[in-house]
Amino acid sequence: MNDPAKIRNVALVGHRGTGKTSLFEGLLFKAGVTNRLGHVADGTTVSDWDDDEKRRQLSLSAALAHVERGGLTFNFIDTPGDSSFLADAIASVHVVETALMVVNAVLGVEVQTERLWARAAERGLARLFFCNMLDRERADFDVAVAALQEAFGQQVVAVHLPIGREHELSGVVDLLAMKAYTYTDGKAEAGDVPAEVADAAAAARDKLVDAVASTNDDLAEKYLMEEEIGEAELKQAFADAVAGGQIYPVAAGSATHLIGVDLLLELLALAPSPSAVPAPVAVGADGADVVLESDAEAPVAAFVFKTLADPFSGHINVFRVFQGTVAGDSTVVVTRDGHKERLGQLLKPQGKETKPVDALVAGDIGAVAKLKDVVTGDALCAEGESITFPAIEFPAPLMSFAVSAKSKGDEDKVMQALRRLAEEDPMLDVHRDAQTGETIVAGMSQVHVEVIVERMKRRFGVEVDLKPPRVPYRETVRGTAKAQGKHKKQTGGRGQFADTWMEISPQPRGEGFAFVDKIVGGAIPRNFIPAVEKGVRAAMSEGFLAGYPVVDVQVKLYDGKHHPVDSSDMAFQIAGSIGFKAAAEKAQPVLLEPIMNVEITVPEENVGDVIGDLNSRRGRVLGTTPRGHSNVVAAEVPLAEMLTYAPDLTSMTGGRGDYTMEFLRYEEVPAHIAQKVIDDAKKEREEAQKG
């Protein structure tokens, strides 16, 4: 395939449990790519091939497959719908022209449906719905379509109509062709529209034609004059309206029973090609916008949107070619830092299998292994070109754990494995906490981090222990106090002597540390003043209440003594540290805790429970705002109370709640809680000394 106009790039997106993987499986089976239909429950699907996915029966990362059918190449991406593993879904909408939004016919519009719709809308993608699971109890196509219209506007219009309800679902009416397809063991038989749905089908077709005609002047005229509109003419106008985001068609069926899946393939043939929609805008070396062209002859510009870390074959980078032709055994420039990479064998993924190809043209998606330094988000360009793509915005991690190697001596292996996995998963954050010295792994949920730990063990052979990270408390003072810091040591030969007097006072919150030199008359020689400050800073880093760093204080050095022989930098450092601790203890010391700005998106019926729960966590609720079918609760909550919030929110909302959290400010910890933190820290120090 060397013509961008013959390519269709489609991402299957939607909430967890809507049947995306089953639909992906059905599309491949119906297209003849596979000769047997895999099932999620059996662990036999093409896309959920990872052991974790089979065990959890849940997609954890995107899977790609391609289909050659009717002179077209379809690149399908099956994306995860669980909020913990959305990185690949978010990245995938950056490299396709069409988002196929899979909806559960029983539950309708869910949280991730709205979130991913917003992402697809930002990218200007064509959007189609597949109303799945119409064979389930309480499934209702009309109710589902009405819910989609309420959420996403009146441009949502049915293009199929189910025949039969719930367990009696037997087929689908194609409203574009006005033909009925009834299914036996997944095989379709075309025929006339059955009498029992004839009226409903006629009314639904009128709505569809009306919606399409409103986007096309020639068709609108024919429609108003009640002239006959040909199927080919209607399909072309329909395809143009879908590509332009003027209508959002809803297809119907049941993926597991293969009902409507073949019709969906035909519908996706009408989805836009890379050359039928405006090309994405990239950024040139001078910072100016560069409009890319879906032209196989233009200079190469490709975007890496997914990285797989494999302990044996190293990295596999999955990329979309936006311009030019990428050939195997060619050289590209990685514009992040300008280094060159020699491409080896190019691949077209088919689940975990790959098919070698010689080249990939503009609009196509493929992969390449064993590049030295290429990561997700990189642009690959022709030599002499310098194009970058806007960074993909991923949600910030919500749940952190401290990790430590189970086996002594495995620390380096753990860090190496974590770094490799973080390259694969952009929503995973791995860092060392400078204050506590702990290695922190932050993810979207407990399940997310647990999956990472399981992958480390299986892929890299290292095991770790997980524990909640320490809250980064801070210490400060509320009052002003003076104290002496004196260090005197005489042990034969030259002694050590330094004497300091200092005053400690609070600074406004967030102002940090100020050291003021008020020494007059040479009580302490100038060359020893920096040593005093160094001693104060060392004492501040260790704290005086519970071992946490001290912030927002002013230290005024106003008097002292020195000895012409025994005074030294080290002596004044020690004296400065002693003086600071003595003054701080008398200046009403207090503990500070981080307060987080929290936004929680929940169904309307759960708002009361969520607010009550936030109050029990010492949270201050600022208000609620409706957003689509949900409500957003804004609150300020101490971080200490949010460490285990994710699983609690999941149980409160049946998995339909979600939240974002960012640091806001430090505030004083209530006395009774502060005392417990101080006691725990003291106990920890005592145990560490014993150990």
Image (cartoon, grey):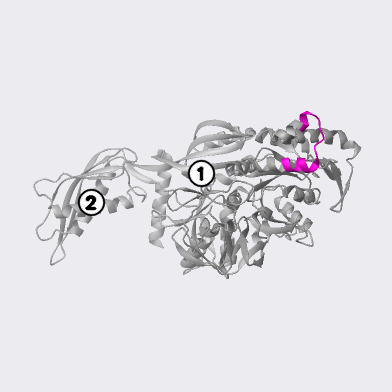
Vertical position of residue 518 compared to residue 305: above or below: above
Residue situated in front as seen by the camera: 438 or 50: 50
Q: Quadrant of residue 233?
A: top right
User: Is residue 99 visible to the viewer in this orientation of the structure?
Assistant: yes
Residue 251 horizontal/vertical position (percent): 75, 43
Q: Secondary structure at mark 2?
A: helix
Residue 173 horizontal/vertical position (percent): 83, 42
Q: Secondary structure at mark 1?
A: loop
Q: Which residues are magenta?
A: 222-237
**Which amino acid type is marked by label 1?**
Met
Query: Residue at 65% across / 63% down in the picture?
Result: 348
**Which amino acid type is marked by label 2?**
Glu
Q: Which residue is mark 1?
A: 642
User: Is residue 146 visible to the viewer in this orientation of the structure?
Assistant: no
Q: Quadrant of the N terminus?
A: bottom right
Q: Mark 2: few, some, or many residues within 10 Å (few <14, many ≥20)? A: many
Q: Furthest-right residue in view?
A: 195
Tell me, yes or no, whether the two marked residues, 1 and 2, touch with CB atoms within 8 Å.
no
Residue situated in front as seen by the camera: 518 or 284: 284
Residue situated in front as seen by the camera: 61 or 335: 335
Q: Which residue is mark 2?
A: 533
Q: Earlier in the sequence, mark 1 or mark 2?
A: 2
Vertical position of residue 326 compared to residue 283: above or below: below
Q: Furthest-top residue in view?
A: 224
Distance CA(mark 1)–CA(mark 2)? 37 Å
Residue 365 horizontal/vertical position (percent): 62, 58
Vertical position of residue 146 compared to residue 136: above or below: above
